[in-house]
Image (tube, helix red, strand yellow):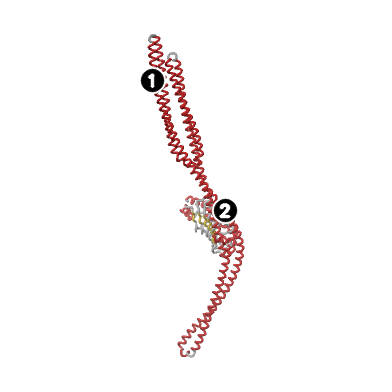
Amino acid sequence: MEQLGQEYARLCAAAGAAPQEAVLQRLREPDAARGRLDLAAQSLSLQTCSALGRLLPGAAPFAALALGDCGLSEEGVRLLLHGLCSNTTVKSLDLKGNNLRTMGAEALGKLLMQNKSIRSLTLEWNSLGMWEEGFSFFCQGLRANNFLQHLDLRNNQINHQGAGELAMALAQNSSLQELDLRWNNIGLLGGRSLLNCLHSNKTLKRLELAGNNVPGDILKAVEQALDHNQDREAILSEAQNRVNILNKEVLSLKDEKNKQFMDFVDTVDKQKEERARSEKMSAARVSQLQEALDEQYSIMNSLKTKLQMTEAALALSEQKVRNLGELLNAMKQEQNSVAECHFKELQQQKQEGADREGRLLHDLSAASEKNLLLRSQVDELERKCKFQQDQLFQVKQDLTNTTAELKLRAVEAEERLEMEKKRFKQSLEDMESLRVKEVDRMTQHMEASERSMHNRIQRLEAIRISLEEELSQVKAAALTERGQAEEELIKVRSQARLEEQQRLEHLEEKLRLMTESRDEAQNCCLKQKEMVAEAQAKAKQLSLCADGLRRRLDELQQDLDSKEEEKVTELNKVKVELQEKIGHLEAERTAQGGLREKIAALERQLKAMSSNHREALLDKEGEISLLLEKLRMKEAEISRMREEEAQRASFLQNAIMAYVQGSPLGTHGSRK
């Protein structure tokens, strides 16, 4: 706000004028910081109006601007309103008590044509209606404006012609909701114009016409039209609320479907990842088995070559080696059979995994929510399977270790054979006589080693058999757990399918009900539109009939006025006569008082005349009683005439009300 004060002072200095202290003080007040600039009852100069007009364009930090009773000149009003034409923040404008005339009305019309932010405009206590051209331009701006909601035109000297211009503007305006026209000179013709414009204006909810000499029947018709607009607005708002609720529910259903689809996609991706991991693990296992087979094949080849080199010298050792080779071949075949069985199991697992994936792809759309709850159980089962697979891998690793030990021992035996052959050759070269002994010793040594090797092979065979039994037990346990897990999955899938089917049926039923309610709302809207069109046509016919009745009422009113004038003149005459007679009587009473005083002094002289005076007094009293009776008769006649006129007015009012209630517009009003 300090920056605005500085900008105002700079603009005033640029215009060659001193800034007004009151304006600077109002710019620095807390109300200005809260978005309200109150300059009411401040005498603003032309330079101040020019500076404020330059501050207001664009996004000025004011939502309300109060300029009431500022004594603004025509040029000052033009400069201020020119600045407000391009303003986008001011919502409320107060210009009451500024005596706006032709130029001010034209500036207001231009403001209403160009400004799109003002929602409330107060123009109380001005003179806009005195100048027909300026007020016509103001009405043109109101006709083109589609943003103003509240307009105050109290005490603006608007006549029936200005009311006609205002009615034509209201017929095309689609945003104004409240209009205050109290204390103007609209009259009967202006009231009719405003009533006719309400047939085409469906947004005006409040119209104040007090103090405008508008007949009561027109005021009642205006109230009925405004009630009809309010009912129409309530029906439209209710229909819009229903449409918004339906749209929100449809969007929520779409969001739920999208979430379910995304959950399904995530689960499919996870299944694919798990499948890829299982394939990688199976490929790694197959590669390990292939490497073990290759190692065994290479070992067998090396053993065959070594045995061929020692065939000539060691027939017994060759036979034993052949036996060992046969045993190794049997082990290889067994390992091959085991590998084939494992490969078949892997293929079967792959096939089962593929089938399971298909079933899961088919069922996961219905069991996505339940699958999240069962993931923990599946994770536990996977951990158990992994643990069992690790045990199998450990067993296989033990088998490979035992085969490696056998290979090492065979290599050591071959090395020992080579060493013995060298020693044997040396011993043959050295001593042929000791050859037989050495051969015997070597054969004995080979037999011992053969026995030890045979014992080790038997032990390894027993170990292999025990490991195979453990492996079969582990497989049987895994199969049982797998069967239990599959049964649980089947149960969970069936339950999830049932729940999803029930949920889908509930959602479809809900969607069907919503579509039916939407169709019913649309049908109701169409019926109401048709009823509105029929009511408008009937209202036009009734307006013609009402015009005839109004003319008849005007004639009757004129007759009543003439009769009232006659009654008033007669009453005045009777009152004058009575007053004259009462004056005479009072004069006579005063005279009688004097006479009584004189009689008190002259009792002796008036004894003879007392009878005459008594007769005169009796005559006077008879005349007074006659006059009082005439007065009572006149008052009874006047009251009778009043009752007759009241009965006539009530009969006429009852007839009009019965006619209005018997029409479709009246029935619609009674229903409301």
Residue under label 1, please give it: 452
Mark 2 closeness class: few <14, some 14–19, many ≥20 residues within 10 Å: few
Q: CA distance from mark 1 to mark 2?
A: 102 Å
The mark lying in front, picked from 1 and 2, is 1
Q: Quadrant of residue 660?
A: bottom right
> Count of labels shown?
2
Apparent side of residue 472 relative to residue 540 in the rendered image (left or right): left
Using residue 497 as the reference point, say whether residue 106 is left or right of it. right
- Residue 219 lies, in percent from the top left, at 56, 63
* Residue 59 in picture, x, y percent from top left: 52, 50
Report which residue position mark 2 lands on.
523
Closer to the camera in the image, 295 or 330 = 330
On the image, which quarter does residue 397 sit in? top left
Q: Earlier in the sequence, mark 1 or mark 2?
A: 1
Amino acid type of the residue tagged 2 in the rendering:
Asn
Q: Position of residue 500 (x, y in %)?
A: 49, 43
Q: Is residue 578 above or below residue 470?
A: below
Circle 1 sits in a helix, a strand or a loop, which is it? helix
Q: Nearer the viewer, residue 438 or 639?
A: 438
Is residue 593 placed above or below 511 in the rendered structure? below
What amino acid type should be assigned to the residue bearing mark 1? Ser
Indicate the position of residue 538 as horizontal and vertical percent values: 60, 60
Q: Quadrant of the C terminus?
A: bottom right
Task: Indicate which disc residue 614 carries.
Answer: none
Disc 2 on helix, strand or loop?
A: helix
